[in-house]
Image (cartoon, rainbow, N blue to C red):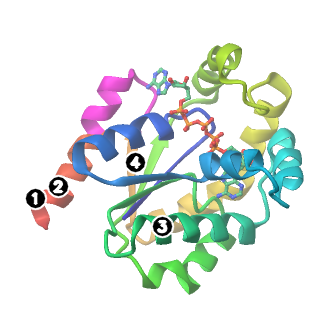
Amino acid sequence: MAFVIGGPGSGKGTQCENIAREFGYKHLSAGELLRAERAREGSSLGAIIEKVITEGSTVPSEIIAQLLEQAMREAGWSDSKFIVDGYPRSVEQLKGWDATLSKKVRFLFCLDLEVSEGEMRRRLLGRAATSGRLDDNEETIVKRFETFKAETGPLLDFFGSKGLLERVDGDRGVDEVWQDVRQRFQKVEDDA
Ligand code: AP5
C-alpha cells in the first residue's frame, strides 16, 4: 500500500483513480470516507465532520482512523493493495497508523504531489460551481492551505528524511502528471 499526499486540489483523487484502474489498487480517500459518514443517516459524527470540513481544519484523528480501518476491513485485509489518499495528514496520524493499521498491510512509499497554491486555488474554485462541497470556497480554501502547511508539512519532512517520499511535480496537466506517477508504481510492480 502507498499513501498519496498533497495540498488541497493537488490532484490526489484524480491520480489515485488512475492508479486504482491501471494497477488494481483499492482507492481509499480520507475526505470521501468523511463525506460519506457525514451523509449517512443516523451518524453521530455528521455534525462534527461538517463543522471541521467547513472550517478547513482536520477532524480528530480517532474518527478518520476508525473509518479507514472499517473500509480496509470491508475491502479484505488479504488484498493489501491499498492506495490511501489524504491520510495520514500529520505526524500524529502517522504515529496512530504505526501503532495499529501498519501491522496489517505492507507500506511501500508516500507519493507527494507538489503543486503551487495559485494552481490549487484555480482548480478548487473551478470545481466549486459543480462540486457541492462545503469547503470549495475562497474563505475555506485559505484555511485548508494553512492547515496543510502547519500539519502536513512536518509529515512530508519526516517521510523525506527516511527516504520514503516520492515527489512528483503535480503542477502540470493530468496526463503529464500521470506519466510520472505511473512510472513510480510500475517500478513497484517490476520489483515485486
Ligand atoms: P479531502 O477530500 O482529502 O480534500 P483535500 O485534501 O482538500 O483535497 P481535494 O479532494 O479537494 O483535492 P485532491 O487533491 O483530491 O484533488 P482532485 O483530484 O480532487 O479532505 C477534505 C477535508 O476532510 C479536509 O479539509 C479535512 O477537513 C478532512 N480530512 C480529510 N482527511 C483527513 C484526515 N486524514 N484527518 C483529518 N481530517 C481529514 O482535483 C481537484 C480539482 O482539480 C478537480 O476538479 C480535478 O478535476 C482538477 N485537477 C486534478 N488534477 C489536475 C491537473 N493536473 N490539472 C488541472 N486540473 C486538475
**Side (left or right) of 144 relative to 169:** right
Mark 3 and mark 1 lie on one chain; the one further toward the N terminus is 3
Instruction: Tell me whether the residue at label 1 lies in contact with that at label 2, contact meaning CB atoms closer than 8 angstroms.
Output: yes
Question: Which residue matches tag 4?
Answer: 167
Residue sticking out furthest to the front? 41
Mark 4 and mark 1 lie on one chain; the one further toward the N terminus is 4
Residue 137: image location, x then y, percent: 79, 24
Please, what is the three-letter code of the amino acid marked with disc 1?
Answer: Asp
Question: Which residue matches tag 1?
Answer: 190
C-alpha distance separating marks 3 and 1: 28 Å
Question: Which residue matches tag 3?
Answer: 74
Q: Nearer the viewer, mark 2 or mark 3?
A: 3
Mark 2 and mark 3 lie on one chain; the one further toward the N terminus is 3
Q: Residue at x 39, y 66 (%)?
A: 164
Residue 179 highlighted magenta (yes or no)? yes
Q: Nearer the viewer, mark 3 or mark 1?
A: 3
Please, what is the three-letter code of the amino acid marked with disc 4?
Answer: Arg
Q: Which residues are magenta?
A: 169-180
- Ligand 1 is within 8 Å of the C-beta of the residue at disc 1: no
* Number of residue marks: 4
Dot 4 lies on which element? strand
Q: Quadrant of residue 98?
A: bottom right
Question: Which residue matches tag 2?
Answer: 187
Residue 85: image location, x then y, percent: 51, 51
Dot 3 lies on which element? helix
Q: Residue at x 89, y 46 (%)?
A: 51
Height in image: 148 above or below 100?
above
